[in-house]
Structure formats: C-alpha cells, structure tokens
Image (cartoon, rainbow, N blue to C red):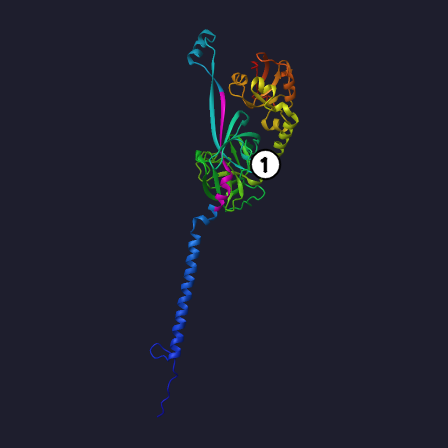
Amino acid sequence: MRQVDSPKTPSLLAPNMTARWEYRFSIALGLLTALTLNLVGSRACFAQADPASEPAVLAVAKVLPAVVNINTERVVRRTVRDPLEDLYAQFFGYNHVRPRQIRQTLQSLGSGFIIDPAGYIVTNQHVVERAADLKIHVTTNDGKTYNAHYIAGDDKTDLAFIKIDAQTDFPFINLDNISPNLLGETVIVVGNAVGYGSSISRGVLSAVKRNITVDDVEYKDLVQTDAAINPGNSGGPVIDLSGRLVGISSAKMAFTPQGVPTQGLGFAIPAEVVRDSVNRFKKIAQKRAGAKNEAGGAETSASNAERLFGMQLQNLSQELTDALGYARGRGVLITAVEPGSPADEAGIERGMAVYRVAKSDVTSVQKVEALLASVQSGSNVDFAVGVIRAGGENSKLAALSMKAR
C-alpha cells in the first residue's frame, strides 16, 4: 500500500527554518508597533493632563490682567437725636436741644474690567451708585491702586462707565469679539468675590433671555448660569473658554418670589448689551472732553473757584445731566473738593452742583468764574449748592456763605 504524505505546514513544533524566522519576525513587528502606539498614547495623556494647557486656565490668564477690584467710599451726614429729647418735646412742646449731625463713611466693594487701553472700565451701576458723591479706588491685578472718576451710568441696564485717572496703557478685554452665548457652554465668573481679588468660579450657561426683578426693578434678557456669583462679583466679567465676554455678573437669586430657596441661579448682563452701552458711554466721554476744552482755563487748577474756595467745576452737558438724573439747564457740577478748603469746611461734596453765586443763577463755569473774578481774599460770598433732580424728587438745596481764602 502506498502511503500519501500530508502537506507540510510551518509549526512551532516542527517548522522549517524560513517559516520559523518569518513567524518570529511578524510577532516582533507586532510587539514593536504596539509599544510605539502605547508610547504615543502616553505622551498624549501626559499633554492633556498638563494643567497649564487646560482651556479654562488659558482663558483666565488671558482676561485676568484686565479685571479690577472697585472700592467706593462715600461720606454721608446723618441727623442724630437723643431719645430723651423726643420725650421732652412730647411733654413740653418744644425741643430743648437741637439735633446734631454726624458724618459717616460708607464703603462698598465690587468688580469691573478694562475695555480700552486708556483705562476705561465698565461695571454695574449699583457698584458705583451715586458715584459723583463717591471716592472710587480701582485696584488692578498687579496690585496697583488708582483713583477713578465716574463718567456715566444707566439704571435700566445696571451698567456704569468709569475711568482710571492715570496716563498709561492698560490690558483690556476686547468687546469686538464676544461669545455666541450657547446653552451648555462652559463659563467662568471672574471678580472680587467677598472681597478676595482674582477669584473665579466655573459653571455652564444654563439659560438666556431671563427676566428678573430685584428691589422692585425689572431686568430683562439676562443670561443665567450655575457658576457661583457672590457679593463682590458684581460688575466682573463672565467669559467662555476662549476668553470672550459672555456678560457681566449682576445678581444672584437666593430665593424665588414665593420664598423657596434656590441653588445655582446667577444672572449676568449679556455681552451684546454691554457692548452697545459702552459705545453710548464713550460718546458721552468724548462730549465731556469737548466741554472741558471749550471751557478752557475756567476748569484748570488756576480757576477762581478752586483758588478761592477749593472747588473744581465742570459744565453740566445734556448727556451728563441725564446720566446723573439732574434737572436740565441748571447749575454747574462740582467734580472735586480740596480737603480743608472753605468748600470742604462748609460741607460741600463732590457731585453736588452750584446753582447760584451771590444773587445770580449760574449754568456754566464761565459764568461762575466771571462772578468770582472780583472777589478778594477774606470776602464772604453767598452760594446755593446741592442737587436738583429731574422731576424734583429727592432734591436738596442749601444756601450757605463761604469766606474766600
């Protein structure tokens, strides 16, 4: 019987030399490929794990130099009465002692951010409310503190415009490229949370076009986020992971109108509203600068008002009058009062207006300067100073006499 041999196939037990080496080479090549892929994957994992390359870290580093802390200080006068004197008046029909006045300093904290290299800042109106009466101090991210002055504000949008009093270029957030504000996108709140500068919180954009009411004032078309917004964040920027502006922190809802506690409900003024308001505020700033130029030497440090009484004055343009809520066509704004001057001793404060000098009503710095041109040192001059608001509500006007120094 003839025996038929089966075909020879390479095997680990009885391979021929060529097949054995081909097999071993294929195994080695496979192991080398796998090792290479593992090394590439490991490097990718190491790169992704590097905190310095995280999008949130890069976004914060981009905008933080332009974020500022705002500290405002206002001196108010309060009338204080002794309760026993009220009882005395109740039984005897008159006051035995006149009420006395005390001066109290009120402070508030907030945030803002620079939108122009010249040092223009946008923040919330409620952060610098009645800022003409305030001293405004701005601290930049590098720890430097500057004085700032109020330019304009809008109660309806809760936005205000101030400027650092310094001749230098500042880092700023560009309003020409803002976030598209997409639901679910990651957002970062940057600001002066509870007095701690350079604080951030992170969340998502959870809703748009929200209408809320705070202190009987209605705010429309706000964006909603679950990122933590705390006292002091007001006026600071909310940004996306590209460092673009989403909005300005404005309010946190702790309770619903029915008194139910809430969590993760913060609201910001949309970037589009901020950009439109800033363009309007810049026009007011330009007109104010033009008014100063027209006044010429009347508003310089050599003015009669400052030399004799320690007051710096400025014309009340229509835009500035409307921004402050003052009555149109009346008075001259007091922009600064020298400490220890006759004006300071008389209780005059920045943000008040001069409405009458001697027996003449005034509506321009030039008119005030002309009336004071013949005043000699030691002479007494009568003034009407205060605030007359549009509509007459909460207006305060006082007649006082000051001795020229």
Q: x%, y% of residue 348? A: 54, 19
Q: x%, y% of residue 271? A: 56, 40
Specify whether residue 387 is in view: no
| Residue 298, picture quadrant | top right
Q: Secondary structure at mark 1?
A: helix
Depth check: give the residue in front, 326 or 131.
131
Specify whether residue 372 is in view: yes
Which residue sits at x=41%, y=66%? 32
Side of 45 where 154 appears, left or right: right
Q: x%, y% of residue 322? A: 61, 28
**Looking at the picture, does residue 274 appear above or below residue 369?**
below
**Looking at the picture, does residue 137 appear above or below residue 352?**
below
- Residue at image mark 1: 278
The residues colored magenta run: 58-76
Depth check: give the residue in front, 89 or 40.
40
Side of 188 where 20 appears, left or right: left
**Looking at the picture, does residue 33 appear above or below residue 237?**
below
Q: x%, y% of residue 76? A: 49, 21
Q: Amino acid at mark 1?
A: Val
In reply to whether residue 73 is colored magenta, the answer given is yes
